[in-house]
């Protein structure tokens, strides 16, 4: 497979399977016991997969060698987590395979997903008013785990939007409306490189959306089924990426987010338990 080719859109993309490759990253090779246990579950359940681990030195070398055109943008992100997010999209786009954060615990192997071409997890019912009002999308896609063939156009669309968000803050502003004041740093990450940006990219590219396997739970409004990689694993939600906060922000921010979540669930429960991977109610506003 020629991983050097850039594939601009779904119409020019020949669907291929996801290679047997697992990609993970951390600031150093030696990880705490909790992380090692979860990393072991990923490798033990997929023994015939190539395993690539990128520490800080290898991530920097990867950018310089594979994507030097993105070096300035990579260094310009305000938060480390934005660089991590951007890196994971680049790595899977380049090599193909499955990416997993270090706090993913797998329960089964991934072979059933190899024919997907591109697979992302359902994350949660969204509290983002722009996704709901502008795109008719009341749910979000997770980016803590995903898989794709090398060069899949959805990953390139995500990469392009990360760059757009960095260069054009006005493009991000609509996604920030209604964000809890005490959680705005978190929402900035969500909407510039994280799940919010991935979800927006999905919503604004309906042709690409048809090529993506979303791992929906049986009931999207059942909170116990959120933050999972389908039936394959669980995101343990360590949350070590979040910017440091004051005592007030740490305690009042989640409380306000919880109230918004309950309000969102009440609205979404009226739409039923299931969702389609194709968003059909996109408005005609600017994207």
Image (cartoon, rainbow, N blue to C red):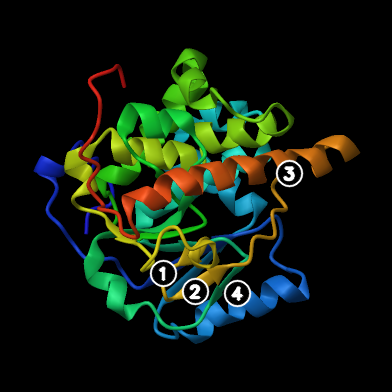
Residue, disc 3: 255
Q: Is residue 83 above or below residue 105?
A: above
The location of residue 26, given as percent across then percent down, is: 65, 58
For the residues bearing labels 1 and 2, Cβ distance under 8 angstroms:
yes
**Residue placed most toward the observer, 117 or 257:** 257
Residue, disc 1: 230
Quadrant containing the C terminus in the rendered view: top left
Mark 3 vs mark 4: which is more N-terminal? 4
Locate residue 204: give its quadrant: top left
Left or right of residue 54, residue 195 in this image? left
Mark in the foreground, 3 or 2: 3
Which residue is located at x 52 percent, y 86 percent? 44
Mark 3 vs mark 2: which is more N-terminal? 2
Residue, disc 4: 39
What is the spatial separation of the Cα atoms under label 2 and label 4, in whole angstroms?
12 Å
What is the spatial separation of the Cα atoms under label 1 and label 2, in whole angstroms?
7 Å
């Amino acid at each position: 497979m020629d991983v050097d080719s850039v594939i601009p859109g779904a119409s020019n993309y020949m669907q291929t399977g996801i290679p047997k490759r697992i990609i993970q990253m951390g600031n150093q090779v030696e990880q705490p016991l909790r992380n090692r246990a979860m990393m072991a579950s990923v490798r033990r359940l997929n023994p015939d997969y190539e395993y690539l681990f990128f520490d800080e030195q290898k991530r920097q070398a990867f950018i310089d060698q594979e994507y030097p055109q993105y070096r300035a943008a990579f260094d310009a992100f305000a938060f480390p987590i934005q660089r991590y997010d951007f890196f994971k999209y680049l790595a899977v786009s380049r090599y193909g395979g499955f990416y997993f954060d270090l706090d993913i615990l797998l329960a089964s192997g991934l072979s059933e997903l190899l024919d997907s071409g591109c697979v992302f997890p359902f994350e949660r019912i969204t509290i983002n008013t722009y996704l709901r009002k502008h795109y008719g999308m009341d749910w979000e896609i997770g980016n803590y785990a995903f898989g794709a063939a090398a060069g899949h156009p959805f990953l390139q669309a995500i990469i392009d939007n990360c760059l757009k968000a960095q260069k054009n803050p006005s493009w991000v502003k609509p996604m920030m409306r209604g964000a809890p004041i005490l959680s705005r740093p978190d929402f900035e990450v969500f909407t510039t490189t994280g799940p919010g940006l991935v979800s927006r990219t999905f919503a604004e590219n309906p042709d690409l959306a048809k090529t993506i396997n979303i791992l929906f739970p049986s009931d999207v409004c059942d909170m116990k089924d959120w933050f999972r990689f389908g039936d394959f694993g669980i995101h343990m939600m360590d949350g070590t990426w979040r910017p440091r906060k004051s005592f007030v922000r740490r305690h009042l921010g989640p409380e306000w987010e919880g109230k918004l979540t309950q309000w969102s669930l009440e609205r979404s429960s009226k739409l039923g338990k299931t969702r389609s991977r194709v968003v059909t109610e996109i408005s005609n506003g600017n994207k």
